[in-house]
Image (tube, helix red, strand yellow):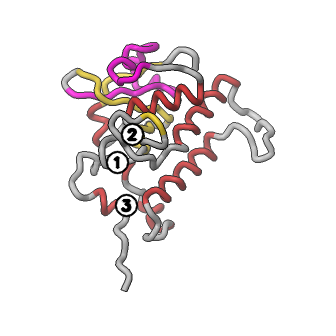
């Protein structure tokens, strides 16, 4: 007799620090559309596909859609697509490649280097000294770096996707994921944001 696999939301209910992060749980409508046997990496791939469709500046034929983003914004969209393609990659402390896994700054550095040709410092504290400081959350733009920490010290970084969401490599035991900046665990840890020159 086959055992039923626990759903993604049930596996998060174990009391982890991220269990209240609304981005880690499926919306009620989405839960009913996905088969319970679908694995978390499969669900992450489904989310990445949907987000890529929303971010894509051109149609399937390669033609630019009317009202498509200017070239600079196209670079940012491409960078975000590169980041979202890494959803489900395991967290590894010190990791900076899809093969070895990523820590938070390794993910951000990899995406900026490979999608934009921009080299960033290796650790989040040093990244937080790069680019233009964004003082107000309402001024965030896609591609901005978002920083988190405790006791006034930066210890985590992600890439802002827009609409209050960011992609990051959260911690040991988790995979690259999309989380909410507005609610849940990460909302309370947000410290600042930076806009990197050249994007």
Q: Which residue in the protein does label 3 denote? A: 8
**Quadrant hosting residue 66:** top right
- 3 or 1: mark nearer the eye: 1
The numbered mark, 2 or 1, whose residue comes first in the sequence reads 2
The numbered mark, 2 or 3, whose residue comes first in the sequence reads 3
Whether residue 35 appears in magenta in the rendering, the answer is no
Residue 93 x %, y %: 33, 37
For label 2, the SS is loop
Q: Badge 1, how many Cα within 10 Å: few under 14, some, many 20+? A: some
Q: Which residue lies furthest to the left in this view?
A: 151
> Distance of mark 2 from mark 1, alpha carbons?
7 Å
In the displayed structure, 149 sits above or below 41; it is above
The tally of labels here is 3
The residues colored magenta run 121-150
Q: Residue at x 60, y 44 (%)?
A: 52
> Distance of mark 2 from mark 3, alpha carbons?
17 Å
**Horizontally, is 140 left or right of 93 in the view?**
right
> Distance of mark 3 from mark 1, alpha carbons?
12 Å
Label 2 with label 3: CB-CB less than 8 Å: no
Q: Badge 3, how many Cα within 10 Å: few under 14, some, many 20+? A: some
Between 158 and 73, the residue placed more toward the observer is: 158
Q: Which residue is drawn at 44% across and 63% down?
A: 39
Residue 97 x %, y %: 47, 37
Please state, as top left, top right, bottom left or bottom right, where the C terminus lies in the image.
Answer: top right
The numbered mark, 3 or 1, whose residue comes first in the sequence reads 3
Label 2 with label 1: CB-CB less than 8 Å: yes
Q: Which residue in the protein does label 2 denote? A: 169
Q: Which residue in the protein does label 1 denote? A: 174
Residue 20 x %, y %: 28, 49
Please state, as top left, top right, bottom left or bottom right, where the N terminus lies in the image.
Answer: bottom left
Residue 186 x %, y %: 31, 37
């Amino acid at each position: 007799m086959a055992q039923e696999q626990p759903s993604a939301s049930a596996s998060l209910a174990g009391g982890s620090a991220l269990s209240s992060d609304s981005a880690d749980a499926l919306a009620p409508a989405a839960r009913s559309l996905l088969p319970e046997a679908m694995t978390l990496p499969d669900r992450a791939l489904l989310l990445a596909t949907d987000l890529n469709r929303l971010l894509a500046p051109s149609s399937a034929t390669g033609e630019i859609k009317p009202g498509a983003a200017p070239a600079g914004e196209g670079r940012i969209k491409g960078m975000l697509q590169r980041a979202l393609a890494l959803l489900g990659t395991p967290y590894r402390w010190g990791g900076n490649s899809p093969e070895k896994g990523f820590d938070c700054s390794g993910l951000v550095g990899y995406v900026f280097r490979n999608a934009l040709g921009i080299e960033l410092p290796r650790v989040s504290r040093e990244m937080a000294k790069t680019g233009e400081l964004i003082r107000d959350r309402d001024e965030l733009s896609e591609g901005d770096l978002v920083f988190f920490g405790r006791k006034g010290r930066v210890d985590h970084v992600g890439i802002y996707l827009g609409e209050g969401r960011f992609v990051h490599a959260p911690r040991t035991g988790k995979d690259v994921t999309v989380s909410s900046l507005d609610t849940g665990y990460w909302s309370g840890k947000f410290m600042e944001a930076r806009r990197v020159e050249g994007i």
